[in-house]
Image (cartoon, rainbow, N blue to C red):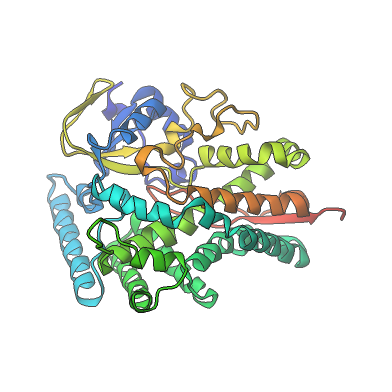
């Protein structure tokens, strides 16, 4: 079947709510498919996605999403030409806003190729070294149990995302960075605005608003950077600000710091884990046999369950690459310079690679073989911390709660409109404490 005959729309709210039938269609009928809206070449099979991730010279990370925003309007009709001009004007406006009011963000870690990527990656690997991450265990464990206990003390009815899934990773990354807890709700508002912009689903007015929000975040963070340069401390943020990234002693510029802190630390360190926790709780309620199996033997099954959640409901459904040369895959030529969407969400449910690909399997061999955290040199730098947060988040439920259920009639299971990320907007649940 030609790619033109495949009817998939990733901006359709129904597809965003449940993209998996669309993933099945693409894997089976068009494993390399050009999205007519974004012009991305979409790759969906596990082996193809993994091979692309592991070949950063061909599938480079020098991607500007502004190309995708303008490509949405890149047609020959007068209306499309007008929209293309408006999109270009919007990009110019956003650029001026950064230059006049804040700092123009540099490329973040995931948008770099070698050797710049490895120089910066070494800095983050040091900041997130296992010994440093393990120091957070007592804080994360106590926070997880306190949040669940508070929900139980209030009768067990809670909006799980707002009351547990957001504060657990958010306050953890805040503690790592040394940001006062009182400021974390505002941090969350800023990261939400960034995530919305990333999703390619904003109006021009929303794009301007989200840029203003990012500049507000920059203005909040800049005095902290300045202080840490003068008075270093033992926080992760102080390490990022002060540790040299090369042999000549260069430290990160303000533009690099704003990009890395907002994108890789605040968004990457909270938003994705929030979505994974809420997806995991939904799975446990919808599949009570998995809950019973997990509760009966968490020591054996919890780590595998965490990996299955990431595989099945990956918070990061896709990331982009740009090909440095022509690529021919499954009979489709991807021209040099084209943007490619590596659809992790589809690859992780590929039945060519996984038995019972759409099911939670707590006996699955090599559960960490999924692509939910990426792989190779660009594997998620916060994967270890995310796993610890999920471990304690689910452990608190297993220890304190006997039964999980949805609040009757309270959930519409809507998902945030976003081309790349997958996250529920709300999850109303009932928690029944052990022995009640």
Is 91 left or right of 330, judged from the image as shown? left
| Location of residue 294 with respect to 117 vertically, above or below | above
Between 181 and 401, the one nearer to me in the picture: 181
Question: In this orientation, does residue 94 appear?
Answer: yes
**Numbered label tally:** 0
Residue 165 locus on image (x, y percent): 59, 58
Residue 59 lies in what quarter of the image?
A: top left
Between 411 and 327, the one nearer to me in the picture: 327
Is 280 left or right of 64, judged from the image as shown? right
Between 412 and 69, the one nearer to me in the picture: 69
Is 177 left or right of 403, judged from the image as shown? left
Q: Residue at x 49, y 23 (%)?
A: 351
Residue 144 lies in what quarter of the image?
A: bottom right
Residue 431 locus on image (x, y percent): 74, 55
Question: In this orientation, does residue 412 appear?
Answer: no
Is 406 left or right of 241, judged from the image as shown? right
Query: In which quadrant is the C terminus drawn?
Result: bottom right
Query: In which quadrant is the N terminus drawn?
Result: top left
Residue 255 locus on image (x, y percent): 26, 66
Residue 89 lies in what quarter of the image?
A: bottom left
- The residue at the far right in this view is 435
Q: Residue at x 44, y 29 (%)?
A: 24
Residue 17 locus on image (x, y percent): 49, 45
Q: Residue at x 83, y 53 (%)?
A: 434
């Amino acid at each position: 079947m030609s790619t033109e005959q495949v009817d998939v729309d990733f901006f359709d709210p129904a597809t965003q709510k449940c993209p998996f039938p669309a993933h099945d269609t693409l894997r089976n009928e068009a494993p390399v498919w050009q999205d007519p809206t974004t012009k991305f070449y979409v790759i969906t099979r596990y082996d193809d996605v993994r091979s692309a991730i592991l070949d950063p010279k061909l599938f480079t990370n020098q991607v500007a999403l502004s190309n995708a925003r303008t490509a949405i309007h890149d047609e020959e009709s007068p209306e499309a030409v007008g929209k293309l001009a408006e999109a270009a004007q919007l990009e110019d406006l956003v650029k001026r806003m950064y230059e006049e009011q804040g700092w123009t963000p540099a490329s973040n870690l995931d948008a770099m190729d070698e050797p710049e990527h490895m120089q910066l990656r070494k800095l983050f690997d040091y900041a997130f070294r296992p010994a440093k991450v393990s120091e957070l265990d007592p804080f994360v464990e106590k926070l997880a149990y306190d949040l669940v206990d508070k929900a139980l003390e209030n009768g067990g009815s809670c909006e799980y995302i707002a009351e547990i899934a957001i504060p657990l990773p958010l306050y953890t990354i805040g503690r790592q960075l040394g940001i006062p807890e009182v400021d974390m709700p505002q941090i969350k508002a800023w990261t939400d605005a960034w995530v919305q912009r990333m999703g390619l689903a904003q109006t021009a007015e929303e794009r301007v608003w989200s840029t203003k929000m990012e500049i507000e975040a920059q203005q909040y963070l800049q005095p902290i950077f300045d202080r840490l340069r003068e008075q270093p401390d033992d926080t992760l943020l102080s390490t990022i600000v002060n540790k040299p990234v090369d042999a000549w002693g260069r430290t990160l510029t303000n533009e690099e710091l704003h990009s890395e802190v907002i994108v890789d630390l605040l968004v990457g360190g909270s938003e994705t884990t929030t979505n994974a926790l809420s997806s995991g709780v939904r799975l446990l309620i919808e599949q009570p046999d998995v809950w019973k199996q997990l509760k009966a033997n968490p020591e054996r099954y919890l780590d595998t369950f965490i990996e299955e959640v990431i595989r099945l409901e990956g918070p990061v459904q896709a990331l982009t690459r740009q090909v440095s040369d022509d690529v021919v895959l499954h009979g489709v030529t991807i021209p040099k310079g084209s943007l490619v969407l590596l659809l992790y969400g589809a690859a992780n449910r590929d039945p060519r690679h996984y038995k019972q690909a759409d099911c939670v399997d707590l006996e699955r061999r090599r559960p960490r073989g999924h692509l939910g955290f990426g792989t190779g040199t660009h594997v998620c730098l916060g994967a270890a911390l995310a796993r610890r947060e999920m471990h304690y988040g689910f452990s608190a439920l297993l220890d304190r709660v006997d039964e999980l259920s949805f609040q009757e009639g309270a959930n519409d299971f809507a998902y945030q409109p976003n081309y790349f990320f997958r996250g529920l907007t709300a999850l109303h649940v009932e928690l029944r404490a052990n022995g009640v």
